[in-house]
Amino acid sequence: CIRCGKCADVCPYNAIILQERPCAKACGMDAIRSDEHGRADIDYDKCVSCGMCLVNCPFGAISDKSQLFQLTQALRGGEKVIAIVAPAFVGQLGPSMTPDKLKAAMKMLGFRHVAEVAVGADLCTLDEAKDFLEKVPAEQPFMATSCCPSWAVMAKKLFPEQANCISMALTPMVLTARLCKQQHPGEKVAFIGPCSAKKLEAMRTTVRSEVDFVLTFEEVMGMFEAKGINFNEITQTAPLREGTAAGRGFAVSGGVAEAVREAISHIDPDREVKTACAQGLKDCRKMLTLAKAGKYNGYLLEGMACPGGCVAGAGTLLPIEKAAAIVRNYTAQAEEKSATETKYEATLPLLLEDEEDAE
Ligand code: SF4
Ligand code: SF4
């Protein structure tokens, strides 16, 4: 027997069951196999750190590395730490944690300042829009977005000939961290988000990330619970006004491509941009296979490793559909709609400085 499963397909009495490991089934990189003893084994040459195996294991047998201890030590030691919070945060900490309580709640944990990563998403949008207008089709047949690290790493591993088609724009996390460090020199930055892959992205040496700690919503919720913070008792509110609707929309699949397309419609109204989106690494691989075959020439392609986008990341706490609906509602409330309206546009060239000096 080579475990091909064909007998289960043809048995008229359903007497044969094909048992698949939930983690291996969820892995869009086919990175999980069984070793000679039948134990799960992750091939780290294939793994892109999306975290889908982690959330699909019914026994909690897979976990990623947490920086909870390091962050807590820094806060207790009096370090000044800025929390930068990903656009998918809305609703993740429960219904009583409304967005206008976020700053007060984070400060109760010991953070000095709080910033929306939607600001970095707006800047990422402008950079990708500029890239697209300059390079497609003159230098490359299509352009793929850069903000999901698992998607970008998958593309570079499996489609090396198309690697130059992945945008080189810095991710929203990195742009927001750089902006914060520019505004508050000497302070540290903690990214709070839905994502396991961001932990590795922050440690990359090829790009200066300026991110000192990465925590998921789940881990931060643990901090609130450990401190006994009751969101219902928070009376101090401060609306978040920095990110545009386009930047906030990055949290849901399709949001990045739409933000870039919308920005281009302002920058070059005559340019029509066709977009295609894939969610989940299996579909992302299919989309890139078609792109490689020339089916997406002239397109802007968005890939999100998690099925549903960042609202489905490994560190989230809400059902995907519910989280997506809450984010869409919050997005609609933004005062500025287009990334082209961000007040931080002038800072973008400064944030991109030193790129060539990075290791
Ligand atoms: S983290 Fe993602 S790519 Fe890596 S083994 Fe798990 S599911 Fe597969
Ligand atoms: S879709 Fe979002 S949460 Fe999932 S791996 Fe990509 S960046 Fe992280």
Image: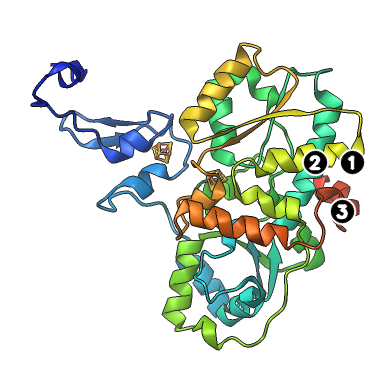
Give the image location of residue 59, x and y in percent.
25, 52
Amino acid residing under circle 3? Glu
In the displayed image of the protein, which residue is found farthest to the front? 12
> Residue beneath label 3, please?
341
Q: Is residue 29 above or below residue 121?
A: above
Amino acid residing under circle 2? Glu
Q: Residue placed at 50% from the left, 42% from the top?
A: 306
Give the image location of residue 151, x and y in percent.
56, 35
Verify CB contact (< 8 Å) between mark 2 and mark 1.
yes
Q: Residue placed at 60% from the left, 41% from the top?
A: 148
Q: CA distance from mark 2 to mark 3?
A: 11 Å
Q: Residue placed at 77% from the left, 57% from the top?
A: 244
Amino acid residing under circle 1? His
Q: Secondary structure at mark 1?
A: helix
The quadrant where ligand 2 appears is: top right
Q: Residue placed at 29% from the left, 40% from the top?
A: 22
Badge nearest the viewer, 2 or 3: 2
Quarter of the image where one finds residue 131? top right
Quarter of the image where one finds residue 329? bottom right
